[in-house]
Amino acid sequence: MKTLLIDSATRDLIAINQLFKENCASLTNIKWMPFHAWLHDFYPQFMSKENQLIYVYKKLAPLAYLYPIYGKMFSYPQFIQQVVNFTQDLALSTIFKEYLLDQDWDNIIDTLPNTLESEKELKKIIELCLTDSNLYPSLNPLSLDFTNFNNIASTNSFSTNIYDTLVHEKCVLNGLAIEPIQSIQNPTYTYRHALNQRIEVEAIAQEIINRKLLAEDIIIIPFDSSYYDLIEQVFNQYHIPYGFIQRSTISPMFTIASSLLRLYINKDIPSLIDALDSHAFPIHHTNAITHYMSQFISSLKDTTIPSNHYTSLSFNFLNTNEDKILINEEKEFNEFVPLIKPYIEKALETSNPQTICNDIFNQCVSLSNPANQSDLYALKALLEDICPLLETSNDLELVLYLTENKTQSVSTSCLGRVSITDKTHQLPSRKIAYIVGVNQKSYPGFISESGIFDEEYRFKTPLISMQYRFNSYLKQLKWIEHCANEINFTYPLLDYQGKKTESSFEIESLVIDITELPCISNDNDMIEKHKLTSELASALFFTDGKLKGSVSSFEKYFSCQYAYFLKYGLRVTDFKFSELASNTIGTIQHAILEESCKRFGKDYAKINADTMKEISIQYYESLLQLFPKEKEKTTLIYNKMIDNLCTTFEFLKDMELQTSFVPTHFEYKFTSDFFENITLQGVIDRIDFSYDLLRIIDYKSSSKTLSETSIKAGVQLQLCTYLILAKYLFDKKTVGAYYYSLKNENISLPAIIESKEVYSDWSSEDTINAFNKSHQLSGWTLLPEDTLDYNASHIKNIRLNKNGLSFTLYDETSIEECLKELYKLLVEQLTDGCIEVNPVKNACTYCMYKTICRFKGQEKDPEVLVLADTSLKKGSGKDEVE
């Protein structure tokens, strides 16, 4: 019987190629095996690397005090892994000494660097491991009998083990026959680029279809592992049959095992959530359950008993939607408790490491299916191998290290399909080859040694040099240049981060010109114009012929019609409530302002921090109950908010002294049918009166200004709508509507002031003026009332000059007409079912519906929809009235 040394992953394709070549139906009397497996029978067997890791860890850990430099690293599996790998290299170098280039040494330990203190420590550590007979029972040099290769032959497979390569070369020199894998001696080459990886792969798929290429005539060799998923997606989309010679994927069984192991070790809520997300239990769970646990459940033991944490809140200031979300979460969690309880009790009670490993494996068995049986067997082999060495709970950290992010090799049939392989699995040549992702970074793709035992350290040892390994790597890589009649090298100009990539020097030496890889792509700027029937639009948006909603909801329509349709028509929501949001802090700030105004009237701004805390204490305590795991964060934000308000009230205190207006209504709720066919509902933060005059103030968490274009575009309706409605609600003259930012902006204070070549110091009065300027109310003034701001330092666009106050005024009649036209347009468009995906700028920034609409165009600037030729300013174009 003849033995053929061949890569097991490519064996079938090579054998079929041989059958076609010899025009026969079968190959008989041939034993197939990889070269490494054949060679492995000739040298002594060591314990597995997993066992070596645990053994070396337990050997070194008690001796950490003897090593002042590296001793503290003995508790890190990554360091122990580097020691194991390097020691294994030294052991193999001793065994394969006869095949090394440099043989001028007797004991390889004596050749290790020994100058620096760190080098001396490393040498002692390595010697301690290499001389341990349990790790390396025999290090006798290997000497193969090269006298008889009559019934054995080998292919020129790519080897990632340099010792295999050295022995293979020696065997060939001594008579080992080579059965070459089919290749092309004089292929044609192209080198082309695409904008990015997706376009690169899509262009290849289009070329395969346009040229009517047969799948069985094509090889694809990615030089970047990130291409595998991309090729799979694109080829499925284009219905191109393909198969993988071998690819690595995250192992599902090892993922489950590592998440369960982390749960047994840490016994905490994050580990339980990780195990649930890994599907480590045969229990259905939802995001609501995991969120509730992360929010309210403090210990693993608490997951075994029902909870009433949220329903027992002493004070609740959440909105109706948030209430529904958390009530539902608590209900789902309580239904989940009896299902998870047996698993949690077992995790809490079990401490013996071998019992834990056994429980974890049994759990994986219960979850396995025929698709991952090989994965399960690999886990079983690992646990059986290492379990005898496990003694303490600390050893479980090593097991966790060995199971985390573990991959498995997966292969699929390539017969009659596009064969997708990698550089280490040589295939018989085909007609067409695409070598993708070939840029400077990935090609040729030789990886040098790094870490503590990097190339610089290895250079001082008799280990095989990097130059030799690199030359050997390039020599083996040459098969790619002969893998097809037509070989197409391709690469992306940009990576996923948008960074530019460069072409490979090695490929440039093969190909004269680099051209573009053509790809037909969809027009991303095309906008689908969605539209509803009038009947459906009426059913979704109108009640009894009227459109009901808040001003902000209608602003949403003018910002993005499709987002309005999803939110207020279909009522699509993400049902998420997960953190201490800025609007929660805004609620507390509004409450303090409202209560202080109710208690102290015009003197509300004179209150101190203690009074603010007394007003808001119930909110703070409710937050602590709502976010029990974020007490420090909540307290920090709360105290910072109080400090911020104290600074803000300094401005408001001065403002109240400079105006006759008195705060009268706070958080004023209204329902209005003022605009035709619309029922408006809303809350006005603050309404001030001065005799028969009225102004409104809207509190904001950051600075905001009114824009005429934004109002006419419908995206900034709130302030002006509230002003017009307040006029009719209270039958008073409207003087102005303003935003007030509760945020304290940074103030720039120059070291010195220059005016007409006169220099002066920055005074405290200048500081006060700068402070007031940064806090000024921003909005529109309708009447030139001096009583608005006596000294013109608290409202923007009111100025003090030698003749008194000057104002930038806006016309109330024009504003009201503008709003009526906008709301009329709103009703008409919704009646007509207009729900286009055509958002204005910033509409998509925080939109939760981007994954639904998949908008890929450019957001438009707000466009004037009504009164395009009419200015809302008063005075026929004049900016000021004095």
Image: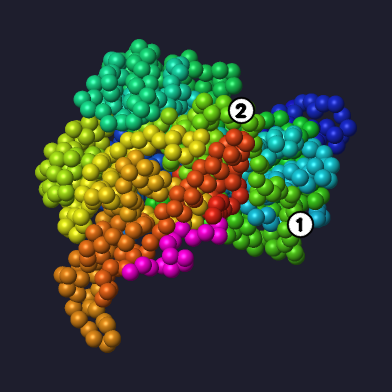
Which dot marks residue 536?
A: 2
- Taking depth in this image into account, of 547 and 227 the one nearest to the observer is 547
The vertical placement of 485 against 243, above or below, is below
Residue in view at x 35 percent, y 35 percent: 670
Give the secondary structure at mark 1: strand
Looking at the image, what colour scheme do you see? Answer: rainbow
- Taking depth in this image into account, of 726 and 605 the one nearest to the observer is 726
Residue in view at x 31 percent, y 47 percent: 732
Q: Dividing the picture into quarters, in which one does residue 489 lie?
A: bottom right
Taking the image as shown, residue 704 lies to the left or right of residue 866, namely left
The verdict on residue 122 being magenta is: no
Q: Residue furthest bottom?
A: 757
Where residue 425 sits: x, y (%)? 66, 41
- Taking depth in this image into account, of 45 and 575 the one nearest to the observer is 575
Residue in view at x 72 percent, y 35 percent: 242
Determine if residue 601 is in view.
Answer: yes
**Hey, what amino acid is under mark 2?**
Leu
Mark 2–mark 1 distance (CA, rounded to whole Å): 56 Å
Looking at the rendering, the stretch of residues picked out in magenta corresponds to: 868-882
**Hey, what amino acid is under mark 1?**
Thr
Q: Mark 1 sits on what residue?
A: 190
Please tell me how many numbered marks the rendered image carries.
2
Where residue 171 sits: x, y (%)? 66, 44
Q: Residues within 10 Å of mark 1 (few under 14, many from 20)?
A: some
Residue in view at x 16 percent, y 38 percent: 615
Q: Residue furthest right?
A: 23
User: Given this view, does label 2 or label 1 mark the residue nearer the observer?
Assistant: 2
Where residue 870 sits: x, y (%)? 52, 59
Check the picture and name the quadrant holding the C terminus: bottom left
Give the secondary structure at mark 2: helix
Marked residue nearer the N-terminal end (2 or 1): 1
Taking the image as shown, residue 217 lies to the left or right of residue 293, namely right
